[in-house]
Image: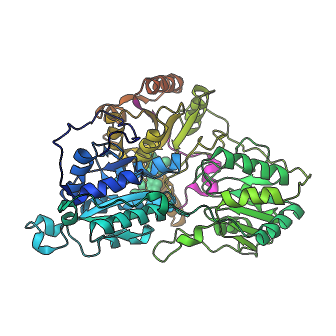
Amino acid sequence: MNAKENLVPNVLAETPKPGPEQKEIWGSDAIAAMLRALDIPYLALNPGASYRGLHDSIVNYLGNTHPQMLLCLHEESAVAIAQGYAKATGKMMGAVVHSNVGLMHATMAIFNAWCDRVPMLVLGATGPWDASKRRPWIDWIHTAADQGALVRGYTKWDNQPGSVTAAYDALLRAVQLANTAPCGPTYVNLDAALQEAKIGPLPALPDPARFRAPEPVMPAERLVQQAAKLLSEAKHPVILAGRVSRSEEGWKQRVALAEKLQARVFTDIKIGCSFPTDHPLHAAPPATFLSPDAARLLREADVILSLDWVDLAGALKAAWGAEPVSAKVIQVSADAHIHRGWSMDYQGLPPADVYLLCEPKAAVPALLAAVKARVAPAPAPAGTLPPASDVVSLRTLADDLNVATKDMDVCLTRLPLGWNGAYRHFRHPLDYLGTEGGGGVGAGPGITVGAALALKDSGRMPIAIMGDGDFLMGVTAFWTATHYKIPCLILVANNRSFFNDELHQERVAKERSRPVENRWIGQRIDEPDIDLAMMARAQGAQGIGPVKERGELLGAIRKGIEAVRQGAVCVIDVRVAPGYDTNVTSSGASQKR
Ligand SMILES: Cc1ncc(C[n+]2csc(CCOP(=O)(O)OP(=O)(O)O)c2C)c(N)n1
Ligand SMILES: [Mg+2]
């Protein structure tokens, strides 16, 4: 390929030796050329014979750059890395998974990416579809009729192209659809025979600029006016700031809209931060479920503006229960375009008195211009926390992290289940990226590595705080970070348990008058106690801990930050006491996930 192209630099010198000049090319060379034309920067992958053709083309035809391969030890990590990258940038990268078995490993992570509405290109492969070309045994077990059915319930589109030019089209469409709001993963399954066919000269590549995702759809002026009138005349307007982009401009526009309306703003810990949590109009610490206090505040609203709130019906139910919702509801969301039969991640059906079927980024500037300024201020009560103690807990971990990162730009790539939204403020759209979307434990490591890849050399330090269960399920993702020199800091809130589910067992035991003290059985990760720092060191990362004393915690975090500044991946095993802050529990964090 043309060496003068403006290529994404290879993040590690995994640069292949050049081979002899070749006149003939192969099907997978053309597919690789199309991936470069589509500007896919990286392909996170675990290898497999079903795509050995494409693998060769990325290495020997493209020179392993733009896209560059990122080797992963598990397909679930490959997809989670692509998710983390998209969470931090809003842009897609690719993941490649081996025919059926690799895709089977990838499914949970694809589901998470779907629920999180991130753009992603997943490439797969199948043993030759033409049975006469199959090698005995292995190609047969790696060929499935309708492989895309494995992921069709949680991908936006899938296809198995039958020729190189059809593959061009499939990739163009897959990228366009994945990037069209609501964003999501798409799956293209590349027949091994198609990849390995000699095709002669490269078929002309289409110009991807002509197949881009559309610009955001603008809301109808009449609806903007209706919504603006409701908001301007409201006594207690509320904004539910939900799924929005990481753009600074969008952040400022939301702040301006809230201030012009003097509207209370709620945010959601399930998704990336959407509004400054220390703003006087911010209503309540972000949480997974509305706390009873937050629900009471929401109930005071007479007009609610939902900016693609993940579970609007659930929030209204928390506030109004079975009673009719007395507030007028303005729904701003394009999400209905992705609502289908298999997955119910679309949540309950909310009422909408005015429905703007568009993204918040299209509606907010229009509303900002159309609303009249309200004067009545609506100061919000600050979130309250129980007093800190000398025990190492999530709370003290948060306190010491806040001290250690004062004046630093940090991106929290992961937070554990028991996190209380009042522990730390978010003041910039990249301060916090939200959760995995689909409730799939084990996503934290991969998402962190993907986000850290996106933030490399940005001056903003990626820091994850994750449960030990989450860490252990996805731990080998950190090898990809050490191998490709992607610095990040991981604080494991290690309560040596799948603790969330201990709370469930406690609840069931109480309900059935059975011994609550048995709640740990089948939940506790103990005897042997796992040395998490050693699991980090085993993969070339730095490992600190176990940190058991409060007095050691701040120093350990500072040491970790310094290591990451020097380019390391660093894991700190923090032995937190089991237990969540009461207002997290009462806000429902212990409900079924
Ligand atoms: C793949 C998957 N398996 C099981 C669960 C059920 N589950 C929800 S939370 C949780 C515990 C997670 O443990 P950890 O990350 O250590 O956090 P902790 O509960 O201890 O705060 C489990 C097992 C899940 N959500 N996803
Ligand atoms: Mg745990």
In the picture, measured across the screen, residue 228 lies left or right of residue 286, that is: right
In the image, residue 588 above or below residue 141: above
Q: Position of residue 443 (x, y in %)?
A: 42, 51
Q: Nearer the viewer, residue 40 or 471?
A: 40
Q: Nearer the viewer, residue 180 or 212?
A: 212
Magenta-span inclusion, residue 374 = no
Q: Position of residue 405 (x, y in %)?
A: 58, 28
Q: Position of residue 567 (x, y in %)?
A: 41, 27
Q: Nearer the viewer, residue 269 or 144?
A: 144
Which quarter of the picture shows residue 279? top right
Outermost residue toward the right in this view:
375
Which quarter of the picture shows residue 126? bottom left
Q: Position of residue 27 (x, y in %)?
A: 23, 60
Q: Nearer the viewer, residue 431 or 190?
A: 190
The boundaries of the magenta stretch are 569-593
In the image, residue 322 above or below residue 466: below
In the image, residue 143 above or below residue 502: below
Q: Residue at x 70, y 63 (%)?
A: 306
